[in-house]
Amino acid sequence: MNARPLLNRRLDGLGTTIFAEMSALAAATGAINLGQGFPDADGPEEIREAAVRALREGKGNQYPPGPGVPELRTAISEHQQRFYGLSFDPDTEVLVTTGATEAIAAAMLALLEPGDEVIAFEPFYDSYAACVAMAGAKRVPLTLRAPSFRPDLDELRARITPRTRLLLINTPHNPTGTVLTAEEQSAIAALAVEHDLLVVTDEVYEHLVYEGAHRPMAALPGMRERTVTISSAGKTFSFTGWKVGWVTASAPLVSAVRTAKQYLTYVSGGPFQYAVAEALRLPDSYFDGFRADLRRKRDLLGGGLRAAGFEVYQPQGTYFITTDIAPFGEQDAYAFCRTLPERCGVVAIPSSVFYDAPDIGRGQVRFAFCKADEILEEAASRLRVLTS
Ligand code: PMP
Ligand code: GLN
């Protein structure tokens, strides 16, 4: 056998995603899975039925159009107008992707040249590091530090070099739950304009903001023509398995991202696109109810984790809570999460793996609260054995 390593050097060290690893651990041990972020209840029944109807009516069972079915592109465009007053042409400025994951990959592959630098918040959502690496580019961290997890804008300025091609923003931010303030967004936008940088912004948790309101980066002055906005139906409608995501951006940016997307998946799953088009048109009461429900769950699990002895960092958005295990006299989040199922029957994610700097997030553990109240209560009660 050829001695050359099988795995492309760019993928070296990426291994198995921590989400898959921890979900497998939950399956093997029967522990409550508060690791990987997926709801334990499906989204609205009428949207599930819409998918069944599309399948039965033969809508999307054969290759749909590459950019997405016109019904969904129009619904995405209407959603951006309805919630943010942003107007995107469904024909040239909207692209449907296979989840936000493909949108991130296609954007990185389309927009980066080898050697380019990408500044992103650390802790990084895991696919950012992978996609930047696959494009041959270099990730440059802008570290969000506990307890507040705010970006240091002077540090951002200092990180920009002549090689910087784009800023990869994520608000609300996974895993910390940070939601950028208007001032932070303005400062980031001003730097992007000053240095003529592209902005790729992952806003999959746009409808899970508990304090204030979500404002897309694309809404800031000077941003529309340089911003690629990414979102997904998975989080907003609790159908993470459908893998319907999308990009909104200017026509030249959408065209670039579409060029890469065509050769990744060619097109994305057909019948679900029709169902997601209906979902995006649900009344405000759906979006308000969803957010209120998750806010209540945040408070429920947050209280339980505090009572169990964790240091809890209150998230302003997403469905994750970041904690620190220092109060237990422990420091290694990965070791803690590996043994947590046998210690008390709960699975969580070691946020430490989302940091390049080994020391900064070492004791950080992320819990997902998109689960039934009884599950959250049971998990919190099990975690109490850590202090007993
Ligand atoms: N970005 C972030 C920040 C996420 O948390 C996730 C996980 N859901 C994704 C992208 C991927 O979304 P999708 O499942 O639509 O590919
Ligand atoms: N986005 C989800 C999370 O952060 C997981 C998605 C995945 O498994 N890639 O938990």
Image: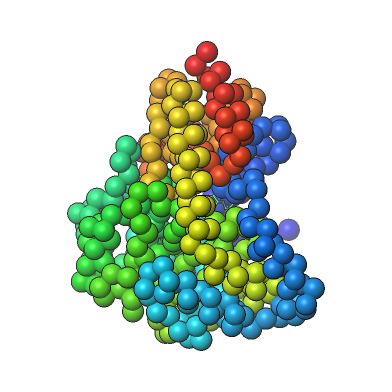
Q: What residue sits 43% from the left and 26% below the top? A: 306
Residue at far top of view: 388
Q: Is residue 325 visible?
A: no
Q: Looking at the image, which residue is at 62% across and 63% down? A: 243
Q: Quadrant of residue 328?
A: top left
Direction from residue 357 to residue 232 in the image, left or right: right
Residue 303 visible? The answer is: yes
Q: Nearer the viewer, residue 225 or 130?
A: 225
Residue 210, percent from left and from top: 40, 48
Give the vertical position of 325 relative to 104 (above or below).
Answer: above
Depth check: give the residue in front, 254 or 43.
Answer: 43
Residue pictured at 47% horizontal, 55% vertical = 288
Picture residue at 64% right of the left edge, 77% below the top: 267
**In the image, 57: left or right of 229?**
right
What coloring was used for the rendering? rainbow
Most extreme residue toward the right, as rendered?
Answer: 56
> Does residue 313 appear left or right of residue 379 in this picture?
left
Total marks in image: 0
In the image, residue 119 above or below residue 363: below
Q: Position of residue 262 (x, y in %)?
A: 59, 79
In-front residue for pair 332/104? 104
Coordinates of residue 169 in the picture (x, y in percent): 37, 60
User: Which quarter shows the N terminus?
Assistant: bottom right
In the rendered image, residue 280, in percent from the top left (x then y), is placed at: 54, 68
